[in-house]
Image (cartoon, grey):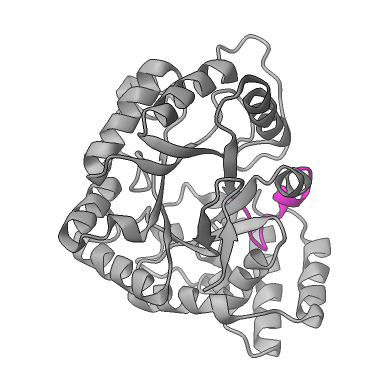
Amino acid sequence: MRKNPLGRTGLQVTDICLGTMTWGQQNTQDEAFAQLDAALDYGVNFMDTAEMYSVPTQGPTYGATETIIGNWFKARGTRDKFILATKIAGPGPWLPHIRNAETRFDRKNIEEALHGSLKRLQTDHIDLYQLHWPDRSTNFFGRLGYKHNPNELITPIEDTLAVLDDLVKAGKIRHIGVSNETPWGVMKFVQLAESRGWPRIASIQNPYSLLNRSFEVGLAEVAIREQVGLLAYSPLGFGMLSGKFLNGQWPETARLTLFKQFSRYTNPQAFAATERYIAIAKQYNLDPCQMALAFVRMQPFTTSTIIGATSMAQLETNLRSSEVELSKEIVKALDEVHVLHPSPAP
C-alpha cells in the first residue's frame, strides 16, 4: 500500500487510514478486533480515533472506542504496528458527559483529556494528537459561511500550543494536528509554531468527498504549500455515495437510517448528485465506493483517506479502493457533476 509523508514529521502513513467511530455502539469489540486484524493484514499502518467516540457521542459510550483499541493492543501486542491518532473534544454545550461540557483547549482540559486517552488506549504516547474542532465559532457542519461573534470567549491558540509543546517534550505526544479547521486557523497555528518554536501541526482532518469539495477552496493550497496534508473524513458521505439510499431505500443498520441528525448528507441536492455519481460508476464498471474513495485518495493535498465500516464486507471493499486508479475521462465526468451540484453536503 502506498505511503505518504505525515507533514514534516518524518513518519510515513498509508494512504488509507482505519476509522473507528462505530466501535462500541454499532460494532462490538469482537467486530472491531476483526477489522483491526484485517486492516493490519492488508498493510494499513494508520488509525484514527477520538476521546468522544463512539458516534453519536453520548455518556454511556464516551471513550468506548479508545477502550476497545487499547484492549486490542494488549491482546495482540501490536501497539508498534500502527501510527495512532486520536483527538480531544472541542467546546460544545451538547457534551455534558465530557468534563461537564467545559471542553476548552486550555491546560486543564488538554492534560485531563490526554491522560484519559492514554489510559484507555493502554499506551504511553499518542503519535498524532488532534484538536477535534476549533475553540472558537467557525466552520459549523452544514454551513459554508462564517458569521463573526466579537463577544465569544475563546482559548488563545498561543495558550493551546504552549500546553501541547510541554506534552511533546514530556514524550506523551509525538506530533499534533487540527480538525474541522479553516485556512485562517491552519495558517495561525503554523505561524505561531514557527515564530515561537512550538510544535508544528502535521495534518488537518476535515470532511472531503464527492459530495463535499469545500476543502478545495482555500485549504487545498495551504495544505500543499505548508505541508499540512488532509486526513479526509466522511469520504463516502456516511455511506450515501454507495448508492444504498437511492430509490427510497433506508437500510435498517445504516448510519443515516439510525442517526437522522446527519441530515446534511440526505438533502435533495445530495440525492441528485449521488444518482449521477452512481451512474458514472456503472458506466465504467466501477464499485461506487471504490470510485469515490479513489477520487479522494488521488488529490495532491490528501495525506490519507479515513475509511470506516460496520461490516467486514464494507471494510474489504474500502481497503481494495487503494488499488483503483481513475482515468482522466472518469475524473472529467465526476467534475461535470460537481459543476451541477457544487456543495450538496457542506
Magenta stretch containing residue 261, yes or no? no
Q: Measured along the vertical axis of the image, is residue 201 above or below residue 215?
A: above
Report the front residue among 87 and 199: 199
Q: Measured along the vertical axis of the image, is residue 100 above or below residue 124?
A: above
Please tell me in which quadrant of the rendered image residue 114 appears.
top left
What residue lies at 46% left-to-right and 26% top-to-bottom?
A: 164
Q: Secondary structure of the magenta portion, mostly?
A: loop
Q: Measured along the vertical axis of the image, is residue 110 above or below residue 129?
A: above
Report the front residue among 317 and 85: 85
Q: Measured along the vertical axis of the image, is residue 53 above or below residue 320?
A: above
The x and y percentages for residue 243 are 56, 74
Please tell me in which quadrant of the rendered image residue 273 appears.
bottom right
What residue lies at 70% left-to-right and 46% top-to-bottom?
A: 223
Q: Looking at this rendering, what residue extends furthest in the left direction?
A: 75
The x and y percentages for residue 289 are 55, 74
Q: Looking at this rendering, what residue extends furthest in the top direction?
A: 151
The x and y percentages for residue 161 are 53, 23
Query: Is residue 287 rendered to the left or right of residue 195?
Result: left
Magenta stretch containing residue 217, yes or no? yes
Query: Is residue 341 rendered to the left or right of residue 43?
Result: right
What residue lies at 67% left-to-right and 16% top-to-bottom?
A: 149
Query: Is residue 213 rendered to the left or right of residue 162?
Result: right
Q: Which residues are magenta?
A: 207-218
The x and y percentages for residue 263 are 54, 51
